[in-house]
């Protein structure tokens, strides 16, 4: 990477962080389930409000929270996950922002999911806890092309497969790592699952995410495949606040 490009990236990053500080982070992506609506003042709405309150309280100290509120047709299920390196205070800000924003984006939806850099939050009237979310996925990429495609693909697969295993076998379901890419370049990676998945399910989810890389991010210097249950990411710069 040329130094001017690097300076530019740092500049953009600094500016983005500056904007983030002023306006709050913007969501990366969201889905409204578009399956069922509740109405203002009904029992589902108050259960959802309670659930989001619980998640806001429960998630920041550990980085993960899940729960359910209510019974029968008014029951709601939810979870929130902060990225493994995110400090308690930032996790709190993110989950709080996510709860407020998703309410604006999907105001009457019984199910919705929203992702930020630092966290994601999901709720539904269907019990989805402990199951891999195969429906909600998106991907992001760095548009810069890699110069040595074959080597790059091989190395990024190697790193992410290792991180998928590492993440699955830890209690925090989170792993980061790096790999030498050449004399002066390194590849940085992340793998993370929601804590309601078992080791086997986490690995399965992450392998599924890695399997989506060729269609989303082939030949690109950075990419993420982000789901409701797991996330993978690779970049040629360190993106984790160590
Ligand atoms: C839910 O409400 C939205 C408007 O807020 C509407 O467009 C949509 O069709 C409704 N969905 C169902 C399943 O009733
Ligand atoms: C990357 O490669 C593709 C196909 O070879 C090309 O169309 C695109 O412009 C390149 N992107 C950049 C940022 O150089």
Image (spheres, rainbow, N blue to C red):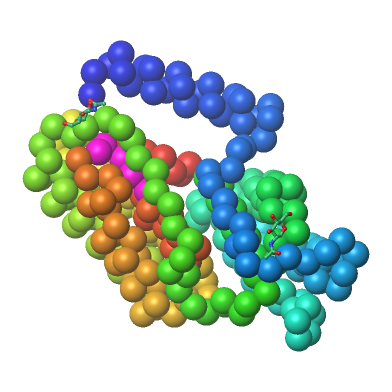
> Would residue 61 be visible to someone looking at this image?
no
In the rendered image of this protein, does residue 84 appear above or below residue 206? Answer: above
Quadrant location of the N terminus in the rendered image: top left
- The image quarter containing residue 188 is top left
Residue 234's x, y, as percent? Answer: 32, 46
The residue at the point 31 percent across, 18 percent down is 5
The residue at the point 32 percent across, 66 percent down is 208
Residue 223 shown in magenta: yes
Q: In which of the image's four quarters is ligand 2 placed?
A: top left
Q: Is residue 114 left or right of residue 9?
A: right
Residue 49's x, y, as percent? Answer: 81, 63
Residue 67's x, y, as percent? Answer: 68, 74
Quadrant location of the C terminus in the rendered image: top left
Look at the magenta stretch and give its main secondary structure.
strand
Q: Which residues are magenta?
A: 220-224
In the rendered image of this protein, does residue 71 appear above or below residue 32? Answer: below
In the rendered image of this protein, does residue 94 appear above or below residue 111? Answer: above
The residue at the point 52 percent across, 79 percent down is 130
- The image quarter containing residue 192 is bottom left
Q: Residue furthest top?
A: 4
């Amino acid at each position: 990477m040329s130094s001017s490009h690097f300076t530019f990236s740092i500049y953009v990053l600094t500016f983005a962080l500056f904007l983030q500080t002023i306006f709050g982070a913007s969501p990366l992506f969201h889905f409204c389930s578009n399956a069922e609506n509740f109405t203002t003042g009904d029992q589902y709405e108050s259960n959802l409000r309670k659930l989001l309150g619980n998640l806001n309280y429960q998630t920041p100290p550990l980085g993960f929270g899940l729960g359910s509120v209510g019974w029968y047709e008014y029951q709601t299920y939810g979870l929130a996950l902060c990225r493994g390196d995110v400090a308690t205070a930032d996790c709190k800000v993110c989950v709080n922002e996510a709860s407020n924003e998703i309410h604006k984006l999907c105001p009457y939806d019984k199910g919705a999911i929203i992702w930020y850099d630092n966290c994601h939050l999901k709720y539904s009237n269907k019990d989805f806890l402990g199951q891999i979310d195969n429906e909600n996925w998106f991907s992001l990429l760095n548009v810069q092309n890699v110069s040595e495609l074959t080597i790059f693909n091989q190395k990024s697969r190697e790193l992410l497969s290792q991180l998928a295993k590492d993440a699955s076998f830890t209690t925090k379901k989170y792993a980061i790592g790096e790999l030498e890419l050449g004399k002066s370049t390194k590849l940085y990676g992340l793998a993370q699952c929601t804590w309601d998945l078992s080791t086997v399910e986490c690995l399965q989810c992450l392998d599924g995410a890695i399997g989506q890389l060729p269609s989303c991010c082939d030949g690109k210097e950075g990419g993420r495949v982000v789901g409701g249950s797991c996330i993978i990411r690779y970049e040629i710069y360190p993106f984790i606040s160590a």
